[in-house]
């Protein structure tokens, strides 16, 4: 081999190495700036993640807020989002059991599998209320761990924010301090807003709800749940059950609350026969919400009740 050919090959090799080094130099800051790629099953969790993550996190929400998160399908789009995720946030306690495990398997992303640091199961971070599905009979799911609908309790969401900020910091130590500070601020905002709203509601309110998805209102508002529109968990309202509710509650005052995606006929029956006002309310904030969206949701729940 001639000296000139050898020199040409060396020159090309050095040029290639220089190109790779330059490309690495360009990409590394961009990847660092991208921070965490987070997928949240519900928009309440997504709102917390956005608030805590700030510019250092990209958040995608899987369950549309106008759908019951119990009953979704493991769509290919869910798997594609999970495949690229650094972190998966789920409520847990059986809420997403019908579709999330299949989506995780389809994503084939070890970083977000159960037991990995990138898998955050919110139900493990708070104390759950007992679920009425544990007392049966019912035709649907049984939440053996407890009621998974704690997204309706801002005090538990505040606890969750602190735990989430800690975990996000463990995954991205360079941003840990900022995550923890934002988590603490979010927790404080949630507690303060809950206290203000509770003070405005007339005391000793009695409410009937459709399912146990609004049970956690009892934890921070002056309300008592005195009945369910469902005949039993997972069983739609029947004429016999609604008539029984009217007989039990006749002559009393109260309010009927149900989710926007639940059928209104049972609530309307109680309104006609008891004179109780009815309100269809969202259970989660809009999908692209930050903390402000969740605070507004809290106001919607509280303002559905008589005010002082």
Image (cartoon, rainbow, N blue to C red):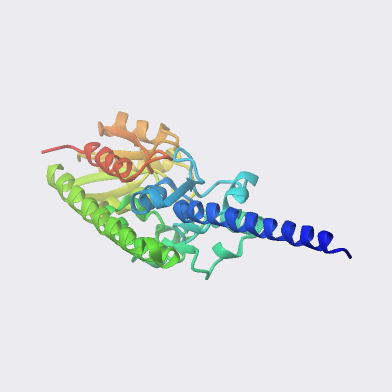
Front-lying residue, 145 or 73:
73
Q: Is residue 127 above or below residue 98?
A: below
Where is residue 142? Give x, y as percent.
49, 60
Residue drawn 83% across and 59% down? 5
Where is residue 23? Give x, y as percent.
59, 53
Where is residue 24? Give x, y as percent.
57, 57
Of all residues, the one furthest to the bottom in this rendering is 115
Residue drawn 13% across and 42% down? 200
Residue 168 visible in the picture: yes
Of all residues, the one furthest to the front in this rendering is 3
Q: Quadrant of residue 275?
A: top left
Residue 161 visible in the picture: no
Question: In the image, 303: left or right of 70?
Answer: left
- Image quadrant containing the N terminus: bottom right
Question: In the image, 205: left or right of 111?
Answer: left
Q: Is residue 141 above or below residue 285?
A: below
Q: Quadrant of residue 253?
A: top left
Where is residue 16? Give x, y as percent.
69, 56
Question: In the image, 39: left or right of 22?
Answer: left
- Image quadrant containing the C terminus: top left
């Amino acid at each position: 081999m001639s000296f000139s050919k050898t020199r040409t090959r060396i020159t090309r090799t050095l040029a290639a190495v220089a190109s790779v080094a330059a490309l690495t130099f360009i990409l590394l800051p961009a990847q660092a700036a991208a921070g965490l790629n987070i997928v949240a099953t519900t928009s309440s969790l997504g709102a917390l993640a956005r608030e805590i993550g700030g510019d250092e996190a990209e958040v995608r929400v899987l369950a549309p807020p106008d759908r019951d998160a119990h009953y979704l399908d493991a769509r290919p789009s869910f798997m594609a989002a999970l495949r690229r995720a650094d972190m998966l946030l789920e409520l847990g306690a059986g809420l997403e059991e019908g579709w999330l495990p299949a989506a995780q398997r389809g994503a084939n992303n070890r970083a977000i599998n159960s037991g990995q640091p990138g898998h955050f199961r919110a139900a493990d971070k708070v104390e759950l209320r007992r679920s009425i599905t544990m007392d049966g009979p019912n035709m649907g799911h049984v939440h053996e761990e407890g009621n998974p609908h704690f997204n309706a309790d801002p005090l538990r969401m505040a606890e969750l924010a602190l735990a989430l900020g800690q975990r996000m910091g463990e995954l991205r130590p360079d941003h840990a301090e900022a995550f923890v500070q934002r988590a603490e601020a979010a927790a404080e905002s949630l507690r303060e807003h809950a206290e203000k709203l509770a003070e405005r509601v007339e005391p000793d309110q009695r409410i009937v709800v459709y399912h146990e998805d609004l049970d956690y209102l009892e934890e921070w508002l002056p309300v008592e749940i005195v009945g369910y529109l469902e005949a039993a968990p997972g069983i739609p309202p029947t004429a016999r059950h609604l008539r029984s509710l009217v007989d039990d509650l006749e002559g009393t005052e109260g309010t009927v609350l149900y989710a926007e995606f639940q059928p209104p006929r049972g609530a309307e029956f109680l309104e006609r026969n008891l004179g109780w006002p009815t309100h269809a309310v969202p259970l989660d904030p809009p999908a692209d919400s930050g903390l402000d969206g969740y605070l507004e949701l809290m106001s919607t729940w509280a303002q559905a009740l008589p005010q002082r």
